[in-house]
């Protein structure tokens, strides 16, 4: 059974919102304090914990080597969002798994373009890094989406892709012939390892880690990863970072994915109410502006943590 | 506009004040578990030996092993004569007869309502334990059973008193007093039940024009002040007003005061400080003096300095 408000509560909340007076005194476009911490899971390739108000999400990204499928396109990422029952004590198991599935789908839609970069290819058309992104919603007091995507973004920022180099097997003394496949198996025993560049040219068949797994290259475009800003539309006003009662008062919610450079790269609508186009325009403009600011603040914060990886309790 | 914070160390130190520590300091327990040099009560951890079982009896939260009383919970040690028990730091509400609770209707059943009171199970409110329209002493009729949603429907908040419980441990409630019944004109804040102490009256009026109902179950209702002589049912019982879902007109100052009080309660809850009307009134005065807006209290530094200031006064 879902969390419900009494009629008196929802009318109190909604009339307050229409007067720009929220339950906790914030203005309509204010966020609660945002906390982001990276490197919380020592065994993951990238991890982060984000908190907005009392909503808390932990995300870990693990890279695994996968063979590419027939079509050259394997599933590049596996996303799973788990909602802890303690975060949603009022939900039964079925609705909890529904919620987790919804969030997982949303997350994989978000991540697919990000993890399809050549950086995650080990050997073109053969091997790639598959990112397993696991998120855990630890507690929820509204605005789970923004918190989840802030945590995912921070975890991707924290992600280090291990450096690899291609390896070519060469039949000793066999000149330029590259032994590949089963036939070459026996003669590969004493194969020489060529350097990365040469390996790539030759069509590498295997790879080698360059250095320890701890160090690696961060994602190239990480400073322009999108942030999520949820607009709660209660005609004619809209507000950000809603608490649970405020979320229940909004008939429509729009998730905007905005890059810090100011590009709106995704919209997802929650709720069944229709959207008046005139309002939508203003809401989107404001949303993009705020998303830019939020993304800039996230970058400043993550950049401020420096290159060093933080231990779980440091 | 956005600032994103780094991880914060948990600043709240348990202050050993869950129940009557002053009294216990006087009778200077001869247990190993006492206060340390600074007068801060120590916490047990599960499996920790508290005292000898030959001299003391085990109570809740403890068990006996090898002639020792051992804690099974993390919490504070309490002693009544020879009975030693551990009161958990975090627990769901454990009802006692006569407690005042604030609850939310979760289900309407045959001649009774199920009420969420932050306990292990939902409490029961029988149709025969509420005031029915047409007089306090009226017997319930079949027609009342058919229109139970006219009195309370799912999601409604109410204030009630705990009656002797059922065999299965579910609490039973009653609202057969004009003080009890449906709640409106305000908002709900949830804190841990250990922060609410038993007191003469759980209905408090703060000087800032806000009424508080401190439910023993940790649900706190903060609403607009209603003058004593304007309370519903003062002149006979007016069912229309008591079971109304409509809010009165609430002006902006009152709304701001309600938000401020609710933020103060959240700050105190974060610091594990038991809530009383005096401490809230002091904190409210401080907040007004400092000219902080209600939303400033959401900031961790402002909250910390408020707590430091108010606890220094107390």
Image: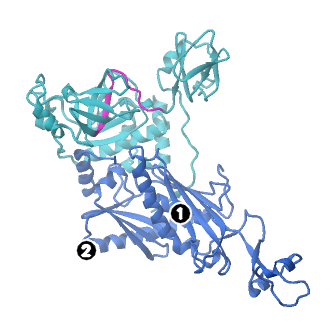
Chain to which the residue tagged by mark 2 belongs: A
Visual hue assigned to chain A: blue
Spot occupied by residue A107 in the image (x, y as percentages of width and height): 48, 65
Task: Find the distance from the CA under tag 1 to the CA under tag 2.
Answer: 36 Å
Q: Position of residue A198 (x, y in %)?
A: 79, 85
Few, some or many C-alpha atoms within 10 Å of disc 2 (few <14, some 14-19, many ≥20)?
few
| Residue at the image position 60 percent from the left and 27 percent from the top | B44
For label 1, the SS is strand
- Which of discs 1 and 2 lies nearer the camera? The answer is 1
- The structure residue drawn at horizontal position 58% and vertical position 66%, both measured from the top left corner, is A156
Label 1 resides on the chain identified as: A
Q: Which residue is mark 2?
A: A278
Circle 2 sits in a helix, a strand or a loop, which is it? helix
Color used for chain B? Answer: cyan
Q: Which residues are magenta?
A: B91-106
Q: As drawn, is A76 to the left or to the right of A175?
A: left
- Magenta span contains residue B94: yes
Seen from the viewer's position, the closer of residues A28 and A250 is A250
The dot on residue A79 is 1
Query: Which comes before the other along the chain, label 1 or label 2?
Result: 1
């Amino acid at each position: 059974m879902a969390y419900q408000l009494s009629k008196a509560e929802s009318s109190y909340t909604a009339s307050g919102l229409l007067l720009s007076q929220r339950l906790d005194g914030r203005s309509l476009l204010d966020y609660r304090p945002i906390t982001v911490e990276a490197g919380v899971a020592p065994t993951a390739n990238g991890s982060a914990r984000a908190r907005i108000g009392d909503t808390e999400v932990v995300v870990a990204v693990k890279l695994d080597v996968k063979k590419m499928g027939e079509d050259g396109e394997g599933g590049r990422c596996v996303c799973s969002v788990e909602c802890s029952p303690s975060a949603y004590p009022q939900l039964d198991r079925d609705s909890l798994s529904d919620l987790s599935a919804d969030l997982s789908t949303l997350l994989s839609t978000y991540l697919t373009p990000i993890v399809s970069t050549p950086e995650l290819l080990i050997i073109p058309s053969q091997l790639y890094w598959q990112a397993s992104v696991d998120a855990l919603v630890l507690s929820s007091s509204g605005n789970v989406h923004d918190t989840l995507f802030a945590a995912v973004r921070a975890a991707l920022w924290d992600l280090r892709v291990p450096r690899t180099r291609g390896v070519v097997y060469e039949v000793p003394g066999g000149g330029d012939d590259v032994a590949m496949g089963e036939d070459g198996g026996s003669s590969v025993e004493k194969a020489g390892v060529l350097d990365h560049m040469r390996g790539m040219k030759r069509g590498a068949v295997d790879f080698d880690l360059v250095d320890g797994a701890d160090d690696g290259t961060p994602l190239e475009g990480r400073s322009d990863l999108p942030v999520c800003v949820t607009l709660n539309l209660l005609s004619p006003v809209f507000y950000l970072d809603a608490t649970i009662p405020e979320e229940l008062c909004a008939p429509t919610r729009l998730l905007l994915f905005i890059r810090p450079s100011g590009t709106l790269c995704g919209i997802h609508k929650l709720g069944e109410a229709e959207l008046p186009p005139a309002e939508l325009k203003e809401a989107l403009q404001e949303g993009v502006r705020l998303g830019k600011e939020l993304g800039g603040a996230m970058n400043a914060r993550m950049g401020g943590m420096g290159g060093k990886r933080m231990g779980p309790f440091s | 506009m956005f600032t994103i914070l780094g991880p914060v160390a948990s600043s709240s130190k348990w202050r050993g004040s869950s129940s009557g520590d002053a009294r216990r300091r006087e009778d200077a327990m001869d247990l190993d578990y006492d206060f340390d040099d600074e007068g801060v009560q120590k916490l047990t951890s599960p499996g920790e030996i508290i005292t000898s079982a030959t001299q003391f009896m085990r109570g809740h939260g403890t068990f006996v092993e090898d002639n020792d009383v051992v804690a099974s919970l993390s919490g504070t040690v309490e002693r009544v004569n020879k009975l030693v028990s551990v009161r958990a730091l975090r627990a769901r509400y454990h009802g006692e007869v006569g407690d005042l609770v604030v609850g939310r209707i979760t289900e309407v059943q045959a001649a009774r309502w199920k009420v969420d009171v932050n306990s292990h199970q939902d409490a029961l409110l029988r149709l025969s334990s509420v005031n029915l329209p047409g007089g306090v002493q009226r017997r319930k009729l079949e027609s009342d059973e058919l229109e139970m949603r006219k009195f309370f429907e799912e999601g409604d908040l109410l204030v009630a008193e705990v009656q002797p419980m059922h065999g299965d441990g579910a609490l039973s409630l009653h609202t057969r007093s004009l003080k009890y019944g449906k709640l409106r004109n305000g908002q709900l804040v949830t804190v841990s039940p250990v922060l609410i102490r038993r007191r003469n009256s759980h209905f408090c009026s703060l000087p800032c024009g806000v009424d508080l109902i401190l439910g023993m179950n940790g649900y706190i209702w903060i609403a607009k002040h209603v003058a004593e002589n304007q309370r519903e049912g003062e002149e006979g019982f007016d069912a229309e007003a008591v079971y109304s879902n409509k809010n009165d007109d609430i002006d902006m100052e009152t709304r701001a005061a309600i938000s401020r009080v609710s933020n103060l309660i959240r700050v105190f809850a974060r610091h594990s400080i038991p809530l009383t009307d005096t401490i809230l009134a002091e904190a409210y005065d401080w907040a007004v003096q400092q000219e902080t807006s209600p939303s400033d209290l959401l900031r961790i530094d402002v909250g910390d300095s408020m707590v430091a200031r108010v606890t220094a006064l107390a």
